[in-house]
Image (tube, rainbow, N blue to C red):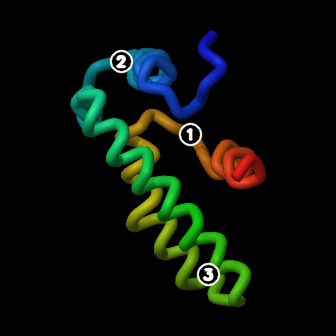
Amino acid sequence: MIKDFSSYEAYLERYRMFWSEEGDGRPPMLSPEEFREKFQLLRECYRTYREMVQDGREDKAADYYVNVINSLENELAIADGSDNFLFEDRKL
């Protein structure tokens, strides 16, 4: 298993596992550039989400998660990336 959660290779591995069955709702595989852009966007979205929660805006945060973050997670084949992004933030 690939250890670098943020690498394109890790995405390809997750995609193959997460979307092992073809069918409705399966997003197309991203190019390396599309992956980098969407991964960075997801990272920024998680920061926004955490800020909303910390500011006491839990209802807005929940809506934001459902309407913005969830679709990005699906495209990136991430079941829940928040823990991974928290780890990255600690390294900064």
In the picture provided, is 83 more to the left or to the right than 59?
Answer: right
In the picture provided, is 75 more to the left or to the right than 45?
Answer: left
**Pointer 1 or 3: first along the chain:** 3
- Work out whether 56 lies above or below 85: below
Q: Which residue is mark 3?
A: 52
Q: Which residue is mark 2?
A: 21
**Label 3 residue SS:** helix
**Label 1 residue SS:** loop
Task: Tell me where residue 18 appears, x and y as whole percent.
Answer: 47, 25
Q: Which of the two residues, 2 or 89, is positioned nearer the viewer here?
A: 89
Residue at 60% from the left image edge and 45% from the top image edge? 80
- Work out whether 83 lies above or below 54: above
Residue 19: mark in rendering: none
**How far apart in space, not on screen, are marks 3 and 2 (Cα)?**
35 Å
- Work out whether 55 lies above or below 12: below
**How far apart in space, not on screen, are marks 1 and 3 (Cα)?**
21 Å
**How far apart in space, not on screen, are marks 1 and 2 (Cα)?**
16 Å
